[in-house]
C-alpha cells in the first residue's frame, strides 16, 4: 500500500525556520513528481510547491517563493520542504501528495501542523 | 494564482442530487481538461474523487460525477447519503507544474 508520512511540524516564532519531511513507501518514489499542499485553519487547500521526479525542476507559489525550498532524496524515498522566514500566515497543516498523470493527486499524507506564533 | 471560486456551502436531503461549481479563468480551468475534486472529512486528509474532469478512481462511488463547461467545472453527487457530508475542493492544473485549488465547499446532508 502507498503510504506518505509527514513529520517536522511544530511551533516556531515569526522569522524562524523548520524542515518538513515526508517518508514515502509502497511505490517507486523516484518515478513520480511530488507536491506540498497546505491548509490554514478553517480554510481551503493551497498548492505550495512541486518537484519533478528527478528533482531537477521545482516550482513555487508566489506566496512562498524565495522563502521555501522543496527537495527530495530518491535514495531515501523522502520529500522535504525547508521553510525559512516564516510568517504568521504560514500557519497551516502541510500535506505531501503524490502526483499522478501530471495533473492530479492520488495519495496524500496525514499532514503535519506548522504553527507560527510569538 | 487566485483561488478558484466555489460556493461556501451546499446542502441537500438524503437521496437528492447536488452540484458544486468551481469557477476559474481561461488560464486554468478553461485551458486544461485537468480538473480534479477532493473530499475531506473533518480532521482527515483529502481523498481524490474525480480526476481529469470526469474520471472516477477505482473505489469511488458512481454517484460522484464531474463535468466542465468553459471556465467552470462541476461536481455532482447523486443519491446523497449521510457519509457524503464533508468538504469538497476542486483543483485545476495551471501550466508549468503549477496548480490552483478552489475555495472549498461544505456539503451538508439535511
Image (cartoon, rainbow, N blue to C red):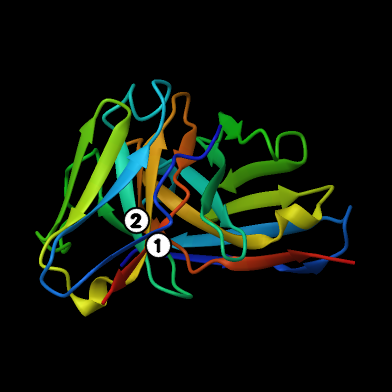
Residue at point 24% right, 38% down?
A: B52
> Helix, strand, or loop for circle 1?
loop
Residue B108, given in percent of the width and then of the height, sits at 32, 71
Mark 1: give few (<14), some (14-19) or many (20+) Cα within 10 Å: many
Report the side of B93 relative to B74 (left or right): right
Residue at point 16% right, 69% down?
A: B80
Report the side of A17 relative to B18 (left or right): right
Q: Which mark is residue A71?
A: none
Residue A66, given in percent of the width and then of the height, sits at 76, 34
Residue A32 or residue A68, whichever sits in front: A68
> In the figure, A59 relative to B44: above or below?
above
Residue B20, given in percent of the width and then of the height, sits at 29, 51
Residue A44 or residue B52, whichever sits in front: A44
Write down the quadrant of residue A114 in the picture.
Answer: bottom right
Tell me which numbered mark, 1 or 2, is placed earlier along the sequence.
2
Write down the quadrant of residue A32 in the picture.
Answer: top left
Residue A53 can be seen in this image: no
Residue holding disc 2: B38
Residue A97 can be seen in this image: yes
> In the figure, B6 relative to B71: above or below?
below
Residue holding disc 1: B46
> In the figure, A115 relative to B18: above or below?
below
Report the side of A14 relative to A101 (left or right): right
Mark 2: give few (<14), some (14-19) or many (20+) Cα within 10 Å: many
> In the figure, B12 relative to B3: above or below?
below
Report the side of B97 relative to B68 (left or right): right
**Would you say the residues marked 1 and 2 are in contact, meaning their CB atoms lie under 8 Å apart?**
yes
- Label 1 resides on the chain identified as B
Amino acid at each position: 500500500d502507498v503510504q506518505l508520512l509527514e513529520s517536522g511540524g511544530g511551533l516556531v516564532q515569526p522569522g524562524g525556520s523548520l524542515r518538513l519531511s515526508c517518508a514515502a513507501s509502497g511505490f517507486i518514489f523516484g518515478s513520480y513528481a511530488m507536491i506540498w499542499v497546505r491548509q490554514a485553519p478553517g480554510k481551503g487547500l493551497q498548492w505550495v510547491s512541486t518537484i519533478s521526479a528527478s528533482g531537477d525542476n521545482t516550482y513555487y507559489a508566489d506566496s512562498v517563493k524565495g522563502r521555501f525550498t522543496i527537495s527530495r532524496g530518491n535514495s531515501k524515498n523522502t520529500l522535504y520542504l525547508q521553510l525559512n522566514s516564516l510568517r504568521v500566515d504560514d500557519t497551516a497543516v502541510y500535506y505531501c501528495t503524490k502526483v499522478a498523470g501530471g495533473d492530479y493527486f492520488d495519495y496524500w499524507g496525514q499532514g503535519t501542523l506548522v504553527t507560527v506564533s510569538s | 494564482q487566485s483561488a478558484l471560486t466555489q460556493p461556501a456551502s451546499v446542502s441537500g436531503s438524503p437521496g437528492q442530487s447536488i452540484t458544486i461549481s468551481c469557477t476559474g479563468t481561461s488560464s486554468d480551468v478553461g485551458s486544461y481538461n485537468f480538473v480534479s475534486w477532493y473530499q475531506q472529512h473533518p480532521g482527515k486528509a483529502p481523498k481524490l474523487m474525480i480526476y481529469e474532469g470526469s474520471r472516477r478512481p477505482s473505489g469511488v462511488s458512481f454517484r460522484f460525477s464531474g463535468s466542465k463547461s468553459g471556465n467552470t467545472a462541476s461536481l455532482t453527487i447523486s443519491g446523497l447519503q449521510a457519509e457524503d457530508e464533508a468538504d469538497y475542493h476542486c483543483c485545476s492544473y495551471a501550466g508549468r507544474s503549477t496548480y490552483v485549488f478552489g475555495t472549498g465547499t461544505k456539503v451538508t446532508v439535511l
